[in-house]
Image (cartoon, rainbow, N blue to C red):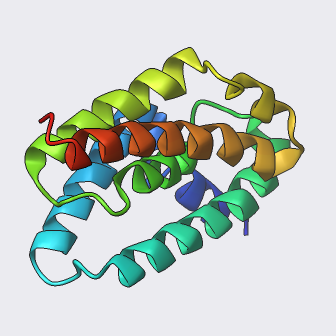
Amino acid sequence: MIKAHKLISSCFGIGYLKGGGTFAALACCLCWYFLSRYGHSNSMWLSVSTIIITGIGIWAAGSIDVVWGKDSSKVVIDEVAGMCVGLLFLPVQLKYIAASFILFRFFDITKPLFIRSLEKLPLGWGVMADDLLAGIYANLIMQIIVFSHLF
């Protein structure tokens, strides 16, 4: 069972790379783009996928805590879930995906506006919640940009 937790938490080994969080978010963006452009652009499907990734991430990150320690840098499923939130309901265009990626990574790394405080939640909830809020902030800014035609 530990192997499954490691595989999921590290997003198939991406978490073992230096800068794994950035690579995991980037991989999410690429998958989002290609899946959305070529067959799965339905917002409901993308929303359900985001919820499933988040649920699996909470379970896997919480279970791997005892092996890797609290919020190990190898755990990058949280970046994938947060990036998915950052992309929800946006037009699937490279410029919006790239801007959302930059905003998400900014919020995820700097952790302003109550993001850091969410890390204190127990087990997988603390691992995932800060990235989900970073994704929400990125998405809110992107919604303003898209609907104001600023970009």
Task: Specify whether residue 2 is in view.
Answer: no
What residue sits 24% from the left and 49% below the top? Answer: 147
What residue sits 63% from the left and 59% below the top? Answer: 57
Q: Where is residue 91? Give x, y as percent.
A: 19, 60
What residue sits 66% from the left and 60% below the top? Answer: 5
Task: Specify whether residue 1 is in view.
Answer: yes
Looking at the picture, does residue 139 appear above or below residue 30? above
Looking at the picture, does residue 43 appear above or below residue 76? below
What residue sits 52% from the left and 45% below the top? Answer: 136
Q: Residue 134's image quarter?
A: top right
Q: Quadrant of the C terminus?
A: top left
Q: Where is residue 64? Give x, y as percent.
A: 75, 50
Q: Where is residue 70? Give x, y as percent.
A: 79, 33
Q: Quadrant of the N terminus?
A: bottom right
Looking at the picture, does residue 98 appear above or below residue 146? above
Residue in the foreground of this view, choosing between 102 and 138: 138
**Residue reaching furthest front?**
148
